[in-house]
Amino acid sequence: MLLVIFFLICFFASIIGAICGIGGGVIIKPVLDAFGVMDVATISFLSGCTVLSMTTYSVIKSKLSGNSNIDQKTGLPLALGAAVGGLLGKWMFSFVSSLSPDKNKVGAVQATCLMLVTIGTLVYTIYKERIKTYHVTNLMACVAIGIFLGILSSFLGIGGGPINLVVLFFFFSMTTKIAAENSLYIILFSQLCGLAVVLLNGSPVGGALPYLPAMAGAGIAGGLIGSTLHRRLSARQVSVLYRCLIFVILAVCVWNLRNFPAFFKASLPADNGAGEKICNSAVSQTEGLTAACGKSLCRLSIFYF
């Protein structure tokens, strides 16, 4: 039953990912985190494999169709930079994981970073029309931007996420549909290198093997449908879907904040009663923050749309 649920999550996430150019991992990772049935390393690996299968299919199909909007002059340096960033991101993930035997702490770091990135993306999207954009052509600048995207993508285990599109909007003045295709091209390189590092390092992924074929298959199937819909939908429709997606991601992040009280309790000692008071205070504040974030998100969504 769980396998079927995971397949459907990856399938629909890959469809949306192929349409909007966000990879799908930004949905898969936090949703699987919310289930709480696998450790963060296994989820990141499975999410990366799903995103890799979807982007590989989508990019190859786009190239073979002859209608590709990938700008090689900027796309290739960005992709190569993302490949280097993917290596660095996996190293950062391994380093953070080595700091604590508790994998939930790593998950808390990832969830917090993802939420901050998504909030930043939302703010940019709201004020997008008022913000001046650029058209970067310098080779080294493109590589540096690619490295940044690769690090973020690989460390968070999300593929690329909305941050890719924001960067392509701001630094390269791309339209929504063109940015979506170039984003998938960048994600392909970063995920390929990131997963190669995991396998070459002999990282334990045994727990992922029962789910891997189904999730990778879901990525390909989602890429097939998503790439077809991407060509048929207008730029405005893709933009609306992208905006809705940002709110969905934020909602999942707010939901995952409910796991933080348990994280506080596991992290703080309760030796003489003082630790218990700190734990209870942290729990109370976190629950209050979760409720406040949820209410603010609802109000903002009404205002935004």
Image: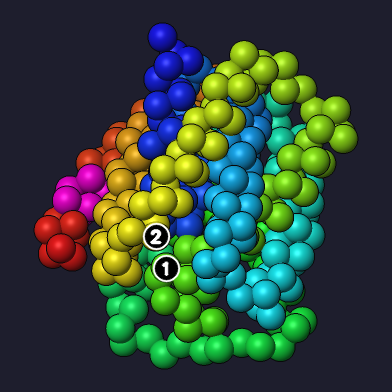
What residue is rendered at 40% in x and 20% in y? 5
Foreground residue, 7 or 233? 233
What residue is rendered at 12% in x and 58% in y? 302
Q: Which SS type dominates the magenta stretch?
A: helix
Please state which amino acid type lies under the numbered disc 1. Answer: Lys
Q: Where is residue 209 in the image (x, y as percent from the top left)?
A: 67, 17
Q: Which colour scheme is used?
A: rainbow
**Relative to residue 93, is residue 11 depicted above or below?**
above
Q: Quadrant of residue 305?
A: bottom left
Task: Give the residues drawn in magenta, as a range.
Answer: 292-298
Judging by the rendered image, the residue that carries numbered circle 2 is: 231
Q: Where is residue 211 in the image (x, y as percent from the top left)?
A: 58, 19
Magenta stretch holds residue 294: yes
Q: Quadrant of residue 200?
A: top right
State the mark number for residue 156: none
- Rate crowding at label 1 as few (under 14), some (14 to 19) or many (20 or more) other CA atoms within 10 Å: many
Marked residue nearer the N-terminal end (2 or 1): 1
- Residue 234 seen anywhere in this rendered image of the structure: yes
For numbered disc 1, what is the local secondary structure? helix
Foreground residue, 132 or 182? 182
